[in-house]
Image (cartoon, rainbow, N blue to C red):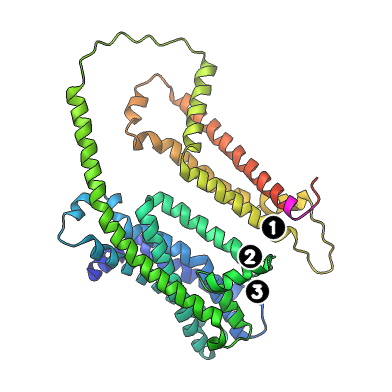
Amino acid sequence: MLINEWSFVWRQPLWWLAIITPAAFGFVLSHGLAAVSDQATIQFQLQLITLTMMSMPLVAGATGVLVLFRDAQSQMAEMILTTPVSPTNRYLTRALMLFISVTLSALLSAAVMWINQPEPWPLISTLLTFLLIIAVPCALVLTCIMLALFRCTTALSSYVIIALLWIGYTYLASLTGNPMLAGSHIHSEALYAAMLWLDPYGFTPYLEYINGQPLFDSQALITNRILVILSALLGSFALCNGISAQLPDKSMSRSRNRERNTTAMVSAPQVSLSPFIQPEISRFGYVSSLIYQHTHMLLSQKLNLLLLLGWAGLIANTVASSITYVEPLQQQSATSLLAVNTYAFDVLPLFGALFMAFWSWQLVARPAQLHIADMIAATRISNVTMVLVHAITISLMAGLLVLTSMLASLAVEVLTASTIR
């Protein structure tokens, strides 16, 4: 089964993209990252932490959807369930394939970064230690997370949740003083102490180890790694068993729904329909109603609400990390203008364009997903009207995105006691 899984994934372009892109990022990072420490060993370890934190969750999200969700995406889930292979063995094999893919990506990218060091061979022990203590447990944790998302959500929602977890952990890292994030410092000693023992990636206790504490004397690092590995293994096995126990219930519920629908169609009484007379509605009211319906459709989806919540967290993290940062020989002037400048010219245009493209796709693809595209085409709504409605709806969503940014920035300004003007 594992050979079959491997034969499937290595033929997928997305899998190759997920493997090669972190390696290219590691190559750029090894040449373009500013030196934080004068010692080559510490600088190399910090580069590995940055590479792992920025790439591994995205690799797990891409390969996890490819490996775990392919039955539903190809509409062959029912056919796969009829095979003699038990669901537990099937999803354990796929989880193992996902773990191998994430580990292989981490190994390749770390090797590329190691080769591009000025003197690589003295750093070979540092590389192996990092892979065993940090990279492999991180791959286990991400595999367990993807299994949980597979059980609870859809493929598209998994992409968004992984992105939110990626942003959320970066925000936590900035709050615990990760030296590779600009403007980060320890905001709470209690949070830092908790992350020493409970950090799922282990970066917080590993940074303590980098600062000179011997490996086997670091109780927080050893305890953290043992807890994370055991929790990830037990969680993965439990989720695979839970998925296998959940599948028959889903199929039975679908069959019951079909029976109810069939019974309702057969036993429906014959009624006479009176002619429908369409009321007279002004063109403005007609367009306003369509705009309201499309905007309500976008805002009623949990995925879009999660996106807006994650966007607010990203803006808050960006403003909080930059508003208190002061260049050497300069005075601190934390004002609203400085807070807006931290996201208005780089973060907002980039992610705003991505959000606009995603919401535009939702507006256009929604009728086809609901199988009502032909019904809408048969109405008297012109294409010009629909384009106008979509454009206004996207403009309203863009305004909501900007408003969310302003509110998140204002909240950070209030918490940091900066000058609001």
Q: Are marks 2 and 1 in contact (CB under 8 Å)?
A: yes
Picture residue at 47% right of the left edge, 45% below the top: 303
Seen in the picture, residue 262 relative to 170 is either above or below; the reply is above
Q: Say left or right for 357 vs 377.
A: right
Q: Which residue is mark 2?
A: 174
Task: Give the spatial CA distance, label 1 vs label 3.
Answer: 22 Å
* Residue 201, label in figure: none
Q: Say left or right for 78 vs 281.
A: left
* Of labels 2 and 3, the one closer to you: 2
Q: Quadrant of residue 86?
A: bottom left
How many other residues sit within 10 Å of disc 1, few (<14), some (14-19) or many (≥20)? many
Seen in the picture, residue 162 relative to 379 is either above or below; the reply is below
Q: Are marks 2 and 3 in contact (CB under 8 Å)?
A: no
Query: Image quadrant for the N terminus?
Result: bottom left
In the structure shown, which secondary structural element does the residue marked by tag 3 occupy? Answer: loop
- Who comes first in sequence, dot 2 or dot 1? 2
In the image, farthest residue toward the bottom: 122
Q: Quadrant of residue 168?
A: bottom right
Residue 30 seen in the figure: no
Q: Which residue is mark 3?
A: 34
Q: Position of residue 115 (x, y in %)?
A: 50, 82
Q: Amino acid at mark 2?
A: Ser
Task: Give the spatial CA distance, label 2 vs label 3.
Answer: 18 Å
- Who comes first in sequence, dot 1 or dot 3? 3
In the structure shown, which secondary structural element does the residue marked by tag 2 occupy? Answer: helix
Q: Position of residue 241 (x, y in %)?
A: 29, 62
Q: Which residue is mark 1?
A: 320
The residue stretch that appears in magenta? 413-418
Q: Say left or right for 154 vs 348.
A: left
